[in-house]
Image (tube, helix red, strand yellow):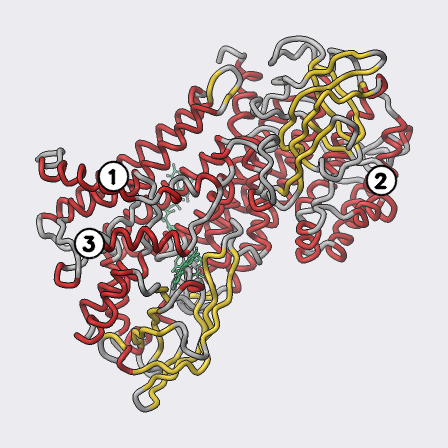
Amino acid sequence: MDLSFSPEDAAFREEVRRFIDENYPENLKGKLDEGEEWSKEDYLSWHRILGRKGWVAPAWPTEYGGPGWSATQRYIFSEELARADTVPILPFGISMVAPVIYTFGTPEQKARFLPRILSGEDWWCQGYSEPGAGSDLASLRTKAERDGDHYVVNGQKTWTTLAQHADWGFFLVRTDASVKAQEGISFLLIDMKTPGITVRPIITLGGEHEVNEVWLENVRVPVENRVHEENKGWTCAKFLLAHERTGIAGVARSKRGIEKLRAIAATELDGDRSLIENPFFKRKLAELEIDLAALEFTELRGLAALAAGKPPGAESSLLKIKGTEIQQRITELTLEAVGHYGAPWFRGFGDSDNEHAIGPEYALRAAPTYFNMRKTSIYGGSNEIQRGIIAKMVLGL
Amino acid sequence: MDFSYTETQTMVRDTLARFLADRYDHETRMKISRGDGWSPDIWKAFAEELGILAAPFAESLGGLGGGAVENMIVMEELGKALVLEPYLSTVVIGGGFARETGRTDLVESIIAGGVTTAFAWAEPKGRFDPANITTSAKRSGSGWTLSGHKAVVRDAPFASHLIVTARTGGGQREQAGVSLFLIENGAKGVVRRDYPTADGGRASEVYFENAEVPGEALLGETDGAFPLVSRIIDEATTALCAEAVGVLRELHRQTQDYAQQRKQFGQPISKFQVLQHRMVDMFMEAEQAASMALMATLKLPDPAAVSMAKAKIGKGLTLSGQEAIQIHGGMGMTDELAIGHYFKRATMIESQFGNTDWHLQRYEALAFGEAA
Ligand SMILES: Cc1cc2nc3c(=O)[nH]c(=O)nc-3n(C[C@H](O)[C@H](O)[C@H](O)COP(=O)(O)OP(=O)(O)OC[C@H]3O[C@@H](n4cnc5c(N)ncnc54)[C@H](O)[C@@H]3O)c2cc1C
Ligand SMILES: Cc1cc2nc3c(=O)[nH]c(=O)nc-3n(C[C@H](O)[C@H](O)[C@H](O)COP(=O)(O)OP(=O)(O)OC[C@H]3O[C@@H](n4cnc5c(N)ncnc54)[C@H](O)[C@@H]3O)c2cc1C
């Protein structure tokens, strides 16, 4: 048993760190701290830089353009990205649809879509959830009917993240309503510019436009855009659930979040001391750090098992539940730390009046981020659903 | 013991509830929030149609003969409808100061709806301690000159007057040396930076840049205003607790309604026991909050009771707000549904006039002594 990383791993970390240092775009540094949001161009610019280096898809097999890293190297890589607070690499293309394509797709599909995902030419969105099918995803009703060598798709998807930027979407649609729900679903790749698709914004609690409704009206999709066999879409979806779990715990990002929180608490005054010296607040920070350590070592145990060749199991549900609880707690304590300055709503400030600034910069996003992060225990399989999975699959209840 | 309302109190509650149901639905509220942040018409109706601005004042002051209980009743209803208009700032706080300093004229103007006040007490580095004041007031001729910066002054963008704590003596965190001023909003040397708040209201950073105010701006005693300030903040905190009760009741009610309608896996999600128990917790938080708001109201001016109530209710607000969103699923995350706005108001109340930790510590100090 050995806790330390090997010298090779340490050297790898050094290499990654240096690359980020030298290549992360100057104009993206600290952007969120200043109250701005990531734009489409922000996401893409970092995606392209990593893409050119061959590092944008750490988990892909080398034959499709992956770097051939070990699980440990992938872990180190994601830690370093988080440490540097980089704009995230969105999962929809790289870690969601691509693994489905290279696992179940035809050679033509692989050749057509994978290079464009790597290069960032195509922006992908995930069209699973519907107004009536959230936690009970298998009850989805958007239907696809065969018409020659096309499917005609009708229905409505919702909560589709960043669909407003998307070139392509991967959709779960009903192709057979006469069988058990899970057995009548197919996995379609749909060009978002196809006539009949309407994308409408949904504004969320922090005031952001992150999710959308996607309406599909007689949308014609070539049959060649179906991945895997007809009515085998649920297999793809389930494969993806098991696959998309690396990094789900968000340990490295949470470490960074706690670092920032510590800095805020050391700056904020509480009478004649700083807030971090307040025993109540210090205790809460300590508990948070302990929870994060427990999560980190749970993840590392999984990583070690994975490295030893054991398949990933339902423990990913544990990582998702505890990871999101910690992420939410960080935002809650950040809002608490900034005191009165959690109240001003940053979207209201038209000008920038430096002489009469409204509170410290780090307070600008405290409330909207706290509100926004409530989503993490809802999406990706809610934490109730995840607990249900552990009860059933792990405990055998 | 008798916790029942008098006939008049019941009438105040019922007419206000009916008025808000008719004239202050969520859509109207959001329109007001996105507009000026308050509605002078609604305020006028509070004064003239409903008369609630007179509710907590003695008859000798032109009021309806009520007091803190009336504030509690009104605030709970305002909480249920997420009312933005400045009853807390004006009637509870402005009216409280006016009553205690014998300013009958001011009470009358508040009751009539002509004067609205915002209370400028917090400072950027003072956290929740109302004695942590650096804003200064110096004598100049027959008046005063004010300098300093007040943080997040709720309702300041539209209030007709500001009530300001300033140091006329003593050191930064001393209770002695605090004085209170009533200043016309927009007076020379008073600079405001206005903005919306996370819960849909309005606030300002207020800067006093050698603002000259007349001698009669002084409210109460020179140097000796702190006990009064502290008392009125306790009254305001108590009224805020009552508002929280209204918010908590709605968080629970709306969540339960939603869970009973929303179907997944072929049944209403309210049938899942995990969700049932959490809605029970939300219900229990609302009930305990009602008990604590009542306790604090009846025990005024006991500061320990106020801090007990605020600490207890603060925890309930956090729990119920988060559960409400969680149980709503994705719908809870939308700006469109009312529930998110209750969650936001709940979050803001938690830290207004001192957050849960602040009041826990204050209670500890009062109950176990400073050394504890
Ligand atoms: C910000 C955001 C981004 C999203 N992005 C995408 C996206 O890009 N693509 C996409 O397809 N979807 C996306 N989603 C949708 C997300 O996956 C769903 O919100 C999620 O599956 C929950 O479904 P629901 O919102 O319909 O809630 P519901 O399923 O109605 O759940 C409501 C509540 O009931 C609970 N519940 C439901 N069933 C049970 C049960 N059996 N036992 C106990 N409790 C239960 C839930 O846990 C929740 O608390 C996103 C959601 C959000 C909020
Ligand atoms: C100190 C003591 C004094 C008692 N005195 C009396 C007495 O004076 N008279 C008398 O008649 N009985 C008495 N009882 C018995 C008591 O009423 C039972 O213990 C109680 O009803 C629980 O039953 P059980 O012990 O069989 O546990 P179970 O019913 O087997 O419960 C085990 C666990 O399952 C949970 N559970 C059960 N059903 C559900 C459900 N539907 N949903 C969710 N969770 C569930 C329970 O909450 C508990 O955590 C006493 C018990 C104790 C411990």
Which amino acid type corresponds to the residue marked 2 in the rendered image? Gly
Q: Is residue A394 visible in the rendered structure shown here?
A: no
The residue closer to the viewer here, A120 or A177, is: A120
The residue closer to the viewer here, B219 or A79, is: A79
Q: Which mark is residue A54?
A: 3
Q: Provide residue B322's location: percent of width, then percent of height.
A: 48, 46
Chain letter for mark 1, please: A
Give the residue at mark 1.
A296
The residue closer to the viewer here, A355 or A279, is: A355
Which amino acid type corresponds to the residue marked 3 in the rendered image? Gly
Instruction: Check contact, mark 1 vs mark 2: CB within 8 A.
Output: no
Report whether the residue tagged 2 is closer than 8 Å to ligand 1.
no
Q: CA distance from mark 3 to mark 2?
A: 68 Å
> Which class describes the residues within 10 Å of circle 1: few (<14), some (14-19), or many (20+)?
some
Ligand 2 found in image quarter: top left
Which amino acid type corresponds to the residue marked 1 in the rendered image? Glu
Chain letter for mark 2, please: B
Is A164 above or below relative to B222? below
Q: Which mark is residue B113?
A: 2
Instruction: Check contact, mark 3 vs mark 1: CB within 8 A.
Output: no
Q: Helix or strand or loop: what does disc 1 sit on? A: helix
Is B290 above or below relative to A375? above
Query: In the picture, residue B189 is in which quadrant?
Result: top right
Please give left or right for residue B309 compared with residue A115 in the image. right
Q: Provide residue A234's location: percent of width, then percent of height.
A: 28, 71
Q: Provide residue B127's location: percent of width, then percent of height.
A: 56, 24
